[in-house]
Every structure is written in structure tokens, then in C-alpha cells.
């Protein structure tokens, strides 16, 4: 399953997250700092979404209330909820 998440309050515009059985398969971050975005995406690929959320939720970027990693945690939460909804259907 793949979701598209429109980010809020950060430089990146969108995050595409592919997940299967709670494991992150692929993350594409559109916009933002290319090196940091690629690094974060590669680090979480292969991780259980819950573990990644625990590590990156709440990270701030400078004086912003959020960051790209924090936005990714929100995208992962949505992906988990969508996966659970589909499993129950």
C-alpha cells in the first residue's frame, strides 16, 4: 500500500510512503533538503513503522514546530491507520 502525504510547515511538499504489514518499504520525499531527505528516507526503509515513529516524532527544525522527520512520522501514522482499516475490511 502506498500513501501520499502533503506536508505542513516544512520545506518538503509531499511524502510518498509504501508500507506492507507495518514495515516501511520505500519513502520518497519531494522538495526540501535533498541530502537530508534521502538520508531520512533510507534510514527508515525496512523498519517497522512504529519504531520509526518512536524515533522521529517530535523532532523540530530550527524554530519551526515540526520538521521533515516529524512530518514523516505523521505520514507513517496515517499509513498504519489505513493499513489497519484495510485489514479490517
Image (spheres, grey):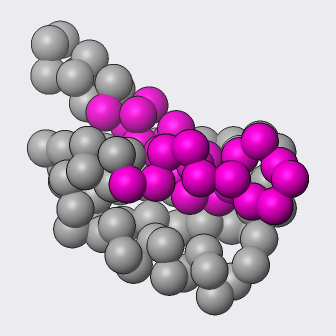
Residue nearest the observer in this picture, 65 or 45: 65
Residue 12 in view: yes
Relative to residue 31, is residue 80 drawn left or right? left
User: Is residue 71 covered in magenta?
Assistant: yes
* Residue 28: image location, x then y, percent: 53, 67
What is the number of callouts on the image?
0
45 vs 47, left or right, is right
54 to 42, vertically: above or below: above
Could you tell me which quadrant the C terminus lies in? top left
Q: Residue at x 46, y 71 (%)?
A: 41
Left/right placement of residue 67 relative to residue 37 reads right
**Residue 43 placement (x, y as % from top left):** 36, 75
Given the current orientation, which residue lies at the most extreme front position?
63
Residue at the farthest top position: 89
Residue in the picture at 22% in, 62% down: 47
Task: Look at 21% across and 68% down and name the residue there.
Answer: 46
Residue stretch in magenta? 55-80
Q: Quadrant of residue 68?
A: bottom right
> Eyeballing the image, is 40 above or below 24?
below
Question: How far across and down, in percent of the image, does residue 30 sit?
Answer: 68, 67
Residue 19 is at least partly visible in this image: no
Where is the N terminus found, in terms of image quarters? top left
38 to 50, vertically: above or below: below
The residue nearer to you, when weighing 89 against 84, is 84
Q: Residue at x 49, y 45 (%)?
A: 57
Does 4 appear in magenta?
no
**24 lies above or below 29:** above
Amino acid at each position: 500500500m502506498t500513501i501520499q502525504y502533503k506536508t505542513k510547515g516544512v520545506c518538503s511538499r509531499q511524502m510518498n510512503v509504501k508500507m506492507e504489514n507495518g514495515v516501511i518499504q520505500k519513502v520518497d520525499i519531494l522538495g526540501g533538503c535533498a541530502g537530508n531527505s534521502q538520508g531520512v528516507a533510507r534510514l527508515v526503509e525496512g523498519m517497522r513503522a512504529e519504531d520509526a515513529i518512536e524515533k522521529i516524532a517530535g523532532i523540530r527544525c530550527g524554530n519551526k514546530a515540526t520538521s521533515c522527520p516529524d512530518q514523516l512520522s505523521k505520514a507513517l501514522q496515517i499509513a498504519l491507520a489505513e493499513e489497519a482499516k484495510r485489514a479490517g475490511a
